[in-house]
């Protein structure tokens, strides 16, 4: 039997009214690799993320994750299968503390239901303690253990992006989708983010990212998929893609 | 639960124990029993409004389901009042699923519409199904609750019992919001997308919370039936549902303690107003209960305009503000 990649996108299409946002897109993401999805603004990259994570149903096409079709599953089911993501516009739970944000990330890894929640106070629940321990571990993984009790909404953008990654990692996903993780970050923060993504790969987590910072993309990616107007115009290693005439045309606007 | 919550429960418990030593008039004890019943319903409603972000305009109907289940099963079928209360809770939970599932799968305030309709149906059935519910005549002779030989047949006994139920209900609700599930619900408030991406099953949680809040209302109704020993459709109309929502909103819907405070204040308000009725006559107004609704409306309007977070959180911010403004450390030249 052929070895399937962790994620296989085939013939993926999304039409909004008369606009074709994603058109017949194919690509694979192998286990443990970093794949970057790049392209000009409005190329449909975030739409692809939204379809993989169950926020949008595709008009057509297939998304295979661990050899299962997931394109019709709702987002919480996709999350439970081991797909975590961050958002282009940071989405932290601003009223909750940094620690609590990451604790929400443990949702798919814990299971206390309605009745147990009602009947036992938190300190009687061993699971609640484990959730907190794990959340603290992931906070120190991204270097934020010192500000665990701050309200998430009060953090600067760089920290909020890191927090989103920590929350996603807390689910211990197989596949991590990062939507423009370096957007709005300064040079130092971008460096730290690149280093963090490298460490995430070392743990065996497959990463799919959308990013505009080409230096970062070319440095960390194993595979780059270039899309324009929802279509794939090139795919390959960073070196291959950089020499592709279609890519140069799309980026330089020929 | 947090430390503040334990302190709050301690204070509430102390007040519940102390009040009968100050008030021994059975009429006022009765008022405090009804206050407890409103509190219980409002705690459930606050879970729904403050944590699941949904409004129910039909909680009076769930109270009615509890009350009529208790009344009918004890008087016609001879069940024990406890069993009847349990049956009422189960019936309410099932009805909550039927009413809630279609509307809570949709985003938006469809639940308010569905429960409003449901509430009207229950009220009409209670009035019109004369053969079963006794119609406007109601049902009498409902037995008291009892623990073995201890029958809850006096105001003071029922007063302690009803407030004990409120405190238990409050502790359970506090457990719930400080759990994985409560965190998930609060996360939905912060960002529904991010909560979904973290695996929070938004629709399921909303339905479960709606069921819990319906059961709280139903138990409150059963307690009402066995305290009053007589029920008629009067108290279970849509206006009572609106009043309950007002209580939660006035106290502050994002805090369970807000619901307790709102329920206590607005349950006692008519008594306070009627004790002032003499003054109303002095300024040439003939005070009647009809003005209550006007005053409730005014209070709700004022709260929404000036303290949208409710009395509990609003009062706290006000206190902090005054403290900072007048604290001696900050006073300089």
Image (cartoon, helix red, strand yellow):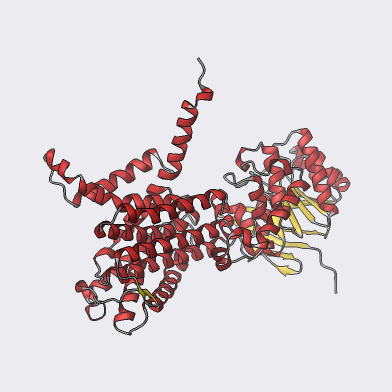
Between A190 and B331, the residue placed more toward the observer is B331
Depicted B180 relative to depicted A90: above or below: below
Total numbered badges shown on the rendered structure? 0
Given the current orientation, which residue lies at the most extreme front position? Answer: B21
Depicted A120 relative to depicted B304: above or below: below
In the displayed structure image, the side of residue B132 where residue B258 appears, left or right: right
Depicted A235 relative to depicted A245: above or below: below
Between B142 and B301, the residue placed more toward the observer is B142
Between A83 and A146, the residue placed more toward the observer is A146
Q: Position of residue B167 (x, y in %)?
A: 45, 59
Given the current orientation, which residue lies at the most extreme bottom position? Answer: B77
Given the current orientation, which residue lies at the most extreme left position? Answer: B284
Q: Is residue B114 visible?
A: no
Seen at 35% across and 68% down, the residue is: B223
Q: Position of residue B267 (x, y in %)?
A: 31, 53
Seen at 58% across and 55% down, the residue is: B183
In the displayed structure image, the side of residue B214 where residue A221 appears, left or right: right
Seen at 48% across and 61% down, the residue is: B106
Q: Position of residue A133 (x, y in %)?
A: 72, 54
Q: Position of residue A73 (x, y in %)?
A: 63, 66
Using the rendered view, name the quadrant where residue B306 is placed: top left
Q: Is residue B262 visible?
A: yes
Q: Quadrant of the N terminus of chain B?
A: bottom right
Given the current orientation, which residue lies at the most extreme right position? Answer: A239
In the displayed structure image, the side of residue A167 where residue B273 appears, left or right: left
């Amino acid at each position: 039997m052929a070895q399937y990649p962790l994620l296989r996108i085939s013939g993926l299409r999304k039409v909004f009214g008369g606009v074709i946002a994603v058109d017949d897109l194919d690509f694979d993401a192998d286990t443990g690799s970093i794949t970057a999805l790049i392209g000009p603004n409005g190329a449909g990259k975030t739409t692809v993320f939204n379809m993989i994570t169950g926020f949008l149903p595709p008009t057509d096409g297939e998304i295979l994750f661990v050899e299962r079709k997931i394109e019709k599953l709702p987002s919480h089911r996709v999350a439970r299968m081991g797909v975590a993501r961050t958002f282009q516009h940071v989405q932290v739970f601003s009223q909750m503390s940094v620690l609590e944000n990451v604790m929400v990330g443990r949702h798919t890894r814990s299971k206390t239901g309605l009745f147990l929640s009602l009947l036992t106070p938190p300190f009687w629940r061993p699971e609640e303690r484990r959730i907190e321990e794990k959340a603290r571990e992931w906070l120190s993984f991204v270097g934020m253990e010192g500000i665990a009790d701050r309200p998430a909404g009060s953090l600067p953008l760089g920290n909020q992006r890191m927090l989103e990654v920590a929350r996603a990692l807390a689910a211990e996903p197989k596949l991590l989708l990062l939507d423009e993780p370096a957007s709005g970050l300064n040079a130092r923060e971008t460096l730290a983010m690149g280093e963090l993504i490298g460490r995430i790969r070392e743990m065996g987590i497959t990463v799919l990212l959308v990013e505009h910072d080409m230096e970062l993309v070319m440095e960390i990616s194993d595979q780059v998929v270039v899309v324009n107007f929802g279509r794939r115009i090139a795919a390959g290693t960073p070196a291959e893609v950089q020499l592709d005439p279609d890519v140069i045309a799309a980026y330089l606007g020929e | 639960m947090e430390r503040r919550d334990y302190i709050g429960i301690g204070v509430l418990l102390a007040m519940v124990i102390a009040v009968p030593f100050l008030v021994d008039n059975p009429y006022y004890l009765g008022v405090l029993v009804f206050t407890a019943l409103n509190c219980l319903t409002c705690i459930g409603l606050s879970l729904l409004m403050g944590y699941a972000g949904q409004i129910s305009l039909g909680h009076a109907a769930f109270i009615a389901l509890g009350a009529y289940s208790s009344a009918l099963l004890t008087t016609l079928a001879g069940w024990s009042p406890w069993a009847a209360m349990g049956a009422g809770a189960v019936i309410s939970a099932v009805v909550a699923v039927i009413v809630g599932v279609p509307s809570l799968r949709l985003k938006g305030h469809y639940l308010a519409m569905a429960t409003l309709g449901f509430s009207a149906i229950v009220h009409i059935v209670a009035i019109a199904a004369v053969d079963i519910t006794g119609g406007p005549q109601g049902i009498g002779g409902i037995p008291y609750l009892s623990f073995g030989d201890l029958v809850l047949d006096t105001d003071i006994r029922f007063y302690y019992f009803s407030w004990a139920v409120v405190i238990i209900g409050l502790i359970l609700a506090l457990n719930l919001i400080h759990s994985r599930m409560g965190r998930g619900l609060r996360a939905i408030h912060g960002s529904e997308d991010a909560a979904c991406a973290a695996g929070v099953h938004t629709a399921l949680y909303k339905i479960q919370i709606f069921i819990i809040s319906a059961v709280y209302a139903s138990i409150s109704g059963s307690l009402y039936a066995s305290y009053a020993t007589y029920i008629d459709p009067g108290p279970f109309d849509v206006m009572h549902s609106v009043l309950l929502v007002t209580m939660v909103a006035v106290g502050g819907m994002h805090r369970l303690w807000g619901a307790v405070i709102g329920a206590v204040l607005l349950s006692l308000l008519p008594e306070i107003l009627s004790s002032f009725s003499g003054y109303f006559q002095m300024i040439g107004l003939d005070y009647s209960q009809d003005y209550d609704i006007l005053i409730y409306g005014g209070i709700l309007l004022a709260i929404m305009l000036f303290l949208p977070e409710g009395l509990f959180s609003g009062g706290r911010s006000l206190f902090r503000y005054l403290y900072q403004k007048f604290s001696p450390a900050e006073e300089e030249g």
